[in-house]
Amino acid sequence: MSKRDYYEILGVPRNATEAELKKAYRRLAMKHHPDRNRDDDQAEARFKEAKEAYEILGDPRKRAAYDQFGHAGVDQSAGGGGGFSAADAFGDIFGDVFGDIFGSGRGRGRSRVFRGADLRYELDLELEQAAHGDEVTIRAPVMAECGECGGSGAATGAGPVTCETCGGSGSVRMQQGFFSIQQTCPRCRGAGTTISDPCRTCHGEGRVRELKTLSVKVPAGVDSGDRIRLAGEGEAGRNGGPPGDLYVEINVRPHAIFERRGSDLACDIPVSFAALVLGGSVDVPTLDGEVALKIPEETQTGRVFRVRGKGVKPVRGGPTGDLLVRVTAETPVKLNKRQRALLQDFEESLRSSSVSHSPREHTWLDGVKAFFEKLG
C-alpha cells in the first residue's frame, strides 16, 4: 500500500518553513491523539501518520532525501527500530512547547552564553554639581571576568568536559505519564559542560568580585531619581556572553540655602524691619553669584519675589527656571535701653495716629469677629 505524501499529511506547502511544519504537527497531534478520541478507531493511525511525517520533514537531512527520492529515500530511516508509543509522541509535543518557552528546543539544549546582570549605583551629588554638571569618579563593586582563567572557570591547562548527566545538551527530560518536560540540567546548570579542575582564583565561577573605577559624566540639570546608563559596565557575562549595564542613580543632597522645585529654586532671606518698611536693596545668593534684589517700601513679611533665569536648566531641555525669594522680617535682639525706649515711642505713635498702619491686623480681626458670630 502506497504512503501518502508527507506534505499532504501535514497540510503544508513543499516550501514550508520549520516553524510552519511544527505548528501543523502540533495541531494534528492534539486533534488526533488517541486519548482524546477513544471512540474513533482511526485516530491512532492518523496520529502515527502525522508523527512520521514530522519526523522526516522536521529533519533537514531527511527532508532533503525525501524531496529528491520520495519515500524511497527515507524508508530505512523512517521505518527504523523501536516501537511507537503515543505517550512518547505526546511527550514530544509538550517537550517542544515547554522547550520554546524556556529556551531549549528538541535536541538543541539551552544556550550556553549568558548576558551579565545589570547593576545599580547610587551617586550622591551637591546641588551645584547637579545644576552645572560635573565629572565624577566612582568605584562600583562588580563581578568581572576572572583574569586567571579568562572566564572559563577551569584551571590553567585544564578545560570544561561534557556533562555526564545531560550529555552536553544542557537539559534533561522529566517524564510522568503522557507528559514529558525538558528542564535545565541540575549538574551543569544548562552549560552542557562541567569543570573537573576549577580555577583556584574564581573557584570555577569564571568571574571574581572587584571594585571597578569609572568616570561618570553628569549632565547639567539632573535631579534626584534621574539615571545615567553606562553601557557594558555591569557584571561580566558567562561563557563569552556580553556584559550587563551599570545604571547610576542620582540623589541630590539637601542644600543649606536653596530648595529645588523642578527647574525653580527657592530660598528664604531675612530682612530688617526698617528695610521692609522704608524699602531698600538686599544681596541675594544664586548658584552663579549674588544679585541685588530691590525691596519696595511697606513690604510685608512672607512676600515672594521672582528672580528670572536664576534657577536650573532642565536636563531634558526647556527654559531655565527662576529663583523664588521669600523675605521674612528679622526681629532685633539684645536691645539696649535707648533702643527699647525708641521702639516703645514708635509703637505709641502708631497707636495714637488716626491713620491705620496695620492692614493685616484689621483683616485678621474681622475674620475673628465673623468666626465668633457664626458660633453664636
Image (cartoon, grey):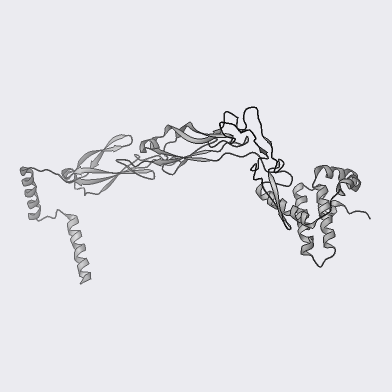
How far across and down, in percent of the image, does residue 258 sit? 31, 42
How far across and down, in percent of the image, does residue 114 sit? 61, 40
Q: Which residue does the image show at 69% across and 47% down from the upper left? A: 172
Q: Pick the residue in front: 1 or 199.
A: 199
Q: Is residue 174 left or right of residue 351?
A: right
Q: Pick the residue in front: 175 or 332.
A: 175
Q: Quadrant of residue 2?
A: bottom right
Residue at the top extreme, as displayed: 157
Q: Is residue 38 left or right of residue 256?
A: right
Q: Pick the residue in front: 103 or 11.
A: 103
Count the marks: how many? 0
Quarter of the image where the C terminus is located = bottom left
Q: Which residue does the image show at 9% across and 56% down from the upper left? A: 354
How far across and down, in percent of the image, does residue 332 sit? 15, 44
Quarter of the image where the N terminus is located = bottom right
Residue at the front extreme, as displayed: 196
